[in-house]
Amino acid sequence: MNKALFFVCSLVNLTTAMLLLGAFSFAQSTIKGTILDDKGFPVSAANVILKPENSQSIIAYGYSNETGNYELTTYKTGSYVLSFSALNYETVSFEVVLTHESKTILQDASLVYKAIALNEVVIESNRPITIKKDTIVFDVKAFIQGNEEVVEDLLKKIPGLTVDSDGTIKAGNQEVEKVMVDNDDFFEKGYKVLTKNMPSSPIEKVELLQHYSNNKHLKGIENSEKVALNLVLKDDAKRQWFGNFLLGYGLISENRYEGRSNLMNFGKKNKYYFLTNLNNTGETATGDISSLIYSFGDEQIGDNEKNQTILGLEVYVPQLKQKRVNFNNAELISLNSIFTLSPKIKLKAMAFINQDENNFYRNSSQSFFANNIFFQNTEDFTLRKNTLVGFGKIDFDFNISSTKNFQFTSKLSNTRNKDRSELLFNDNLLQERLNSNNHLLDQKIVFTNKITTNKAWLISARVINEKTPQTYELNQFLYDDLFSSNANNIAQINQNEMAFYGIESYLLNREKAGNLLEIKFGNQYRRDVLHSNFQIKNGNQLIDNPLGYQNNTVYGVNDLYAILKYAYRLKKINLVPQIDLHQFFNTLEIAEMKASQTPFFINPKLGIEYEMNKKNKILASYAFNTTNASILDVYSNYVHSGFRSFTKGTGTFNQLEASNALLSYTYGNWGDKFFASTFIMYSRNHDFLSTHAVIAQNYSQYDKIQIKDRDLATLSSSVDYYFRPVSSNLKLVVGGTKTNYKNVVNNSNLRAVKNNLIYYGLELRSGFKGIFNYHTGTKWDYNEVTTTINNSFTNNTLFLDLSFVLNSKMNFQIQTERYFFGNLEKKHNTYYFMDLEAKYTVKENKLSFFLSGNNLFNTTSFKNYSVNDISISNTEYRLQPRYVLLKMDYRF
């Protein structure tokens, strides 16, 4: 077995080396010339395609520019057909012979005009990639390899798009804003529900929308760098009901199952998408479910507002595929509809219920070193989380006129968690029970008035109410060193509430020279309530509510603000000064004590963009920020936050100042053959909240303290290059972070903590049209933590994915991974995984069978090593054992 595993890893390195070597050993041929019409005028936007004779496969393609010139490059050899075509012209073809010698072939073309009578017929060119202003259109037929099942699989094949292991989709290095279907959006930032479940077969084209605006009236006015995707359906998938259901059950594994069904109708007026998903194979159907429930990062009023809780039985999951450590029993049903009630009114309704039981298993040994105190804790931990989420959302869109629009959005969410743990802590059996309920109501209205072509005004208002009551019980009493009592268990009851109210006016004015003025005025009020009741008990009898461990805190923040931003274009330089003005009215009630303050902030920012040419761009920015404290910073007494930890806020108002500087450079444009980017960021926290920690074997107490000066420096660089000789894309990444801060441990003086993280790696992905494709890569991570002592380690990951499409009926994929941990003993520092997916199509787009194997090497546990400023941990996780599923997919 070890030899076989060694061969897999060696194959990765060998493949990478051979491909990189081969990329420079092939001779390149260049074909170029000029395309004219029969009157001698240049023909622009003509298709130039190089392909084998009597074949539809494309070797190289391009288009003529405004002067009629074109240029193709290829590393292929042999006899090929070079064809020239354009709308309203007859196609012309030539034979070209390519040899192993590098050379340039000149081939001009003269196209004869041919009038085409159009009788309700639309003529479209068959380009694999078409660029229309800010939209890049990908013809799916040119990129599929035959093994795509869901939308996520398809998007992995589109040039320039990457899909992370958790389903996050990026164009270049930027996450997409949303994934739409025929220009209608169901899920916004929660697009993973769609991409992980919807079949890919109905998709005809994928549109990448650059400079995307969430508000259509702001398109062409605002400076947007957002990107979005639109899935264009085939004609036979529109205006009719269609879908699929997939059923799978374990062959050699008991009680392993997977089921998924989709029912869809994408009509001109109404659209429906219904789905169900249930499995216990570790797969998640929703991605990060908070992306559906909350709004993050859209820069609209109320975004990023969320109730804050302190207590939770959360677990750290190692950097593996989620299905390896997720022992689940998931059930999801989602009903989503878009109704066009009239030419002016559109209503979107969304609802889902998701229930999941997750089990988690961990053994750990943690060695503490804190101000001359050394001890070791061992834990054998089992956690079962039972979560039920019900969510509903309504979007009402009313186009009052061609320039005025009214939107109303309402969200309602109810989440119930029942968490149970069994923990063998230093040979003492502990049982934790945590019941938590979250109730959320979020309502927003937005009115947009496009005053002129270049000027728009928006007014928005939002109300959010969220409550999270929690009840926690622990069947042991570990705190004899803190409390003198005859107790044998403890409990804590928390009540967290948040209410948010806000209104904002936003004016955008793009001047004739292209300069953009943005003005925002608004007022936001947030009120947080934190009640915590810590109870020391003997059986069911309450013994004590110790002083200093009860909280009754009400924190109110009223923010009256104005934001002025002006983007000024000066030839190749774009200057973007911005100033944020905030007048705060803060109130803090702690038990019987009441306090208030009225701080005034001025936060300036300056951005500079320098476009040297179409290939080279530089961006620099500087910002000075003063931030106001949150409820998690100001509560005055301890809250029980875990079976052996207590945390405490400052008990007073806090405003923290920081400076941030950024410098980035990019070469090339999205989708180019060669693209490189790098950025350096430096952040200086002039004030920050650190901790004064008391670390003991059975408990830890963390008091927040405000101290001076914390530094963070980050470097990240990436290079993407497409090698035509081997039809493969190479990606190199290198980066790291360097931080230093201060804290207090066990009554020590302020001590300096330094952390260095460095990473580097590469990936190589093929785009062959034949039966075989690969994706391989490796990455190293170096981590160093320095306090009074120094700890460091280096980890490495390696993967090789192979895909074989034998014919239209049969394909299979093999995925392999290797993990290496530098600071673990030899017998526990290397781990291997292999997965298999094979498909046999009985009838195309109708009936298919799959054989799916997970963890074929049956690696049942996984150890890793971590360090921080007070401890070193060796942790072992239980993994999903080997299983094989037989699955059937039926489409209708």
Image: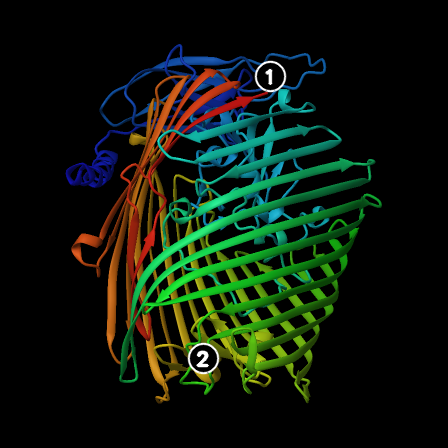
Image check: 253 left or right of 353?
Answer: left
Which residue corresponds to mark 1?
88
In which quadrant of the rendered view does residue 526 lie?
Answer: bottom right
Q: Name the quarter where the C terminus is drawn.
A: top right
Task: Relative to 78, say whether 215 is above or below.
Answer: below
Are the residues tagged 1 and 2 within 8 Å (C-beta)?
no
The percent coordinates of residue 144 (x first, y second) are: 45, 27
What mark, if any, has residue 702 been given in the picture?
Answer: 2
Pick the front one: 240 or 827: 827
Between residues 169 and 863, which one lies in front from this camera angle? 863
Residue placed most toward the observer, 192 or 298: 192
> Residue 242 at x, y = what percent?
63, 24
Q: Nearer the viewer, residue 34 or 323?
A: 323
Residue drawn at 54 percent across, 12 percent down: 90
- Residue closest to the far top: 54
**Closer to the observer: label 1 or label 2?**
2
Which x, y percent locates residue 813? Answer: 35, 30
Who comes first in sequence, dot 1 or dot 2?
A: 1
Helix, strand or loop at disc 2? strand
Q: Position of residue 614 (x, y in %)?
A: 47, 47
Q: CA distance from mark 1 to mark 2?
A: 75 Å
